[in-house]
Amino acid sequence: MKSFPKFEKVCLIICTSIAISSLFATKAFANVRCIQSFLSETVFDPGPVDGAWGKKTATALQDYASYHQLKLKTKIDRKNAESLCTELTSLELKSKEPSVRRFKVNITLKDLEEFTGRKQIDLSQISVLDELNYSDCRFTISRQQIETKRIESLAAGRFNIESGLIKFGENSWYTGGLADGSYLIDQGVLAFSDDFKLNGSIPYFHLFVSTGEIAERPLQIDFSESKEDETWAKSRKNKYWPKVYKFDVDHWQTGMIKLRCSGN
Amino acid sequence: MLRRDLLKAIPASLFLTGFPNLGITKNLKDGRLVVINLEGGMDGICAVPPLGDKSLRSARRDLLINENLQLNPFFGLHPSLKNFGTMLSADEATIVHATAFPYTKRSHFEGQNIVETGILTPFSSKTGWLGRAMEIAGVGGRSLSLDTPLLVRGNSEVEAYYPSDMRGSKFPDSDVLDALKSMYEGDALETAEVLQRQINLSLDAPRLRDPEGLATFAGKKMQELHGPKVAVIRVPQFDTHANQGTEDGLHSEQLQVVDNVFGALKSGLGPMWASTVVLTVTEFGRTIAQNGSAGTDHGYGSACLIAGGLISQAGIVSDWPGLKTSQMHEGRDLNATIDMRSVCAACLEVAFGLEHNEITEKVFSDTQVKRIYDEIFS
């Protein structure tokens, strides 16, 4: 019998082992592909469905299992692809049931300010004058036209001070339209800090309406940067009141709020 | 006249109902419920974009918006929804995503009918889901509108009452404008156009019959002790087949209207906001991929925006289906993995204190509707 030359023997061994290993490889390939194609139907992305086990496939499978609170019997590993495939296939029907979940919302203050274009008032950042309490106070809001110096009243009403926080009560705007007392009650956030300075913001209707029907949305006036009006501060006879703050509105008018409480 | 102005000229409507029937009202929760009906098919992927889904960018290259508010690593919020974003950050709002009434045939007429009746066979019911729920809860009576919308119709008669003190709309009826213009030529036509320009001058000022004004009015009425407990506000024109736009497009403008309605309801309701839930409904979402005219077509799943003091924690309630072709409904639409009837049932439960089983049986006539109250309100 003619024997194979040495070279041919080696080649036969190599070819046989390649054939055997590729047979196994094909099976492994099919199993990984089975896992990947299962995952690709879900929101957990296993990367391309190519039969190659990689970090993406493993992570996606891990995420899928933890999202659905599944306790897989098989350890997530390339070696266990076959049993993982079997396990997932048996789950397939079950996984099609809706699994409703609440994703958390996490909005930072900075993002919100940027998004809304409005400064968010957070009174927890200031040291509020806790001992300040008054139960009978009145306020007026007015504006002054810059060019003519003419002063007009815009709103007036009552407020209380509870532990340094201003609680707006009954009040009314003279500006017409949609403006009414609820805006200050709901959206006015004002407090006195330890140095008896006004902090926070109020809604401010900056336009009068002749027909009583149209009003622009109120502006938000922020008091964090504003200072007490010195002329009023010098002229007051009472220790605290009135407190008057002027604020910039637009090129045409400046606004003013005057706060006065009875008692010491 | 621009098409956009013409579209704006179609007014929104307000329906206030659910006045307590004294002596009949059951001893249930005294909540308030507002439904904002977004007609035309609101694009949930535009309002609450899944920014973390890689397929979004390729599907919508001309419609991508850069100035979204990042809600979490996966979802964002459209820049028009500033009031709603503020409510989310204060735990006064929540979102249900990839939801729809189980209707997949993409017809406005059938879809809107199902949104109102809550019954899955179109035109098979003469009453609305809200009307039937109000009957069970013992709130009913008058409807503050010229006609009673199907949504709030129940089996018992509802009186209609239209408040005469609601003045003025910013936009006159488009038919009237067209009729006026068709009557004139030459100089006279210019006069008609001057009229239009004058109308456009005060575009930013709300009036009572615009959605924002209507919402404030609704809120104030609902705040009253014996005031209405239910309001329905219609915001039309979400059907953006062409030129949907990005930050400044037509869809964004309509979302701005919705956001103003949320803001106005909150300020109108005052302290009653704490006992209120407001939700949006729409007949379907829109296709995931943009079409050839930079718009989107009738789809399936959309997003539902919910706000009000009855919410205890902000979140995005979803079983996110994904945006890949294999994950789409019929290879084109966002799949709906949450039945919108479950969302409505949860809102009825929180506002009126009705039992879920009673709602599924008597309101939706389908006991298979799942309870997702805990995911939304707990």
Image (tube, rainbow, N blue to C red):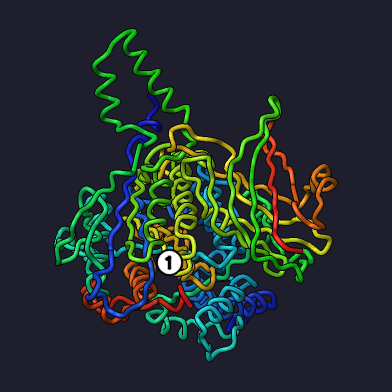
Judging by the rendered image, the residue that carries numbered circle 1 is: B276
Between A260 and B312, the residue placed more toward the observer is A260
Between B29 and B305, the residue placed more toward the observer is B29
Where is B139 relative to A148, above or below?
below
B51 relative position to B183: left or right? right
Q: Which quarter of the picture shows residue B173?
A: top left
Where is A243 relative to A76, above or below?
above
Circle 1 packing at 10 Å, graded few (<14), some (14-19), many (20+), is many
What residue appears at the point 47 percent right and 27 percent down from the top-left corner? B201
What residue appears at the point 46 percent right and 74 percent down from the top-left corner? B377
In the image, residue A159 lies at what x, y percent? 62, 59
Kindly give the residue lying farthest to the bottom in the view shown. Answer: A73
In the image, residue B270 lies at what x, y percent? 48, 60
B372 relative position to B54: left or right? left
- Examine the rendering and report whether any part of residue B129 can be seen: yes
What residue appears at the point 32 percent right and 69 percent down from the top-left corner? B341
B347 relative position to B24: left or right? right
Where is B209 relative to B378, above or below?
above
What residue appears at the point 29 percent right and 19 percent down from the top-left corner? B181
Considering the image in quadrants, where does the N terminus of chain B appear? top left
The three-letter amino acid code for the residue at tag 1 is: Thr
Badge 1 element: strand
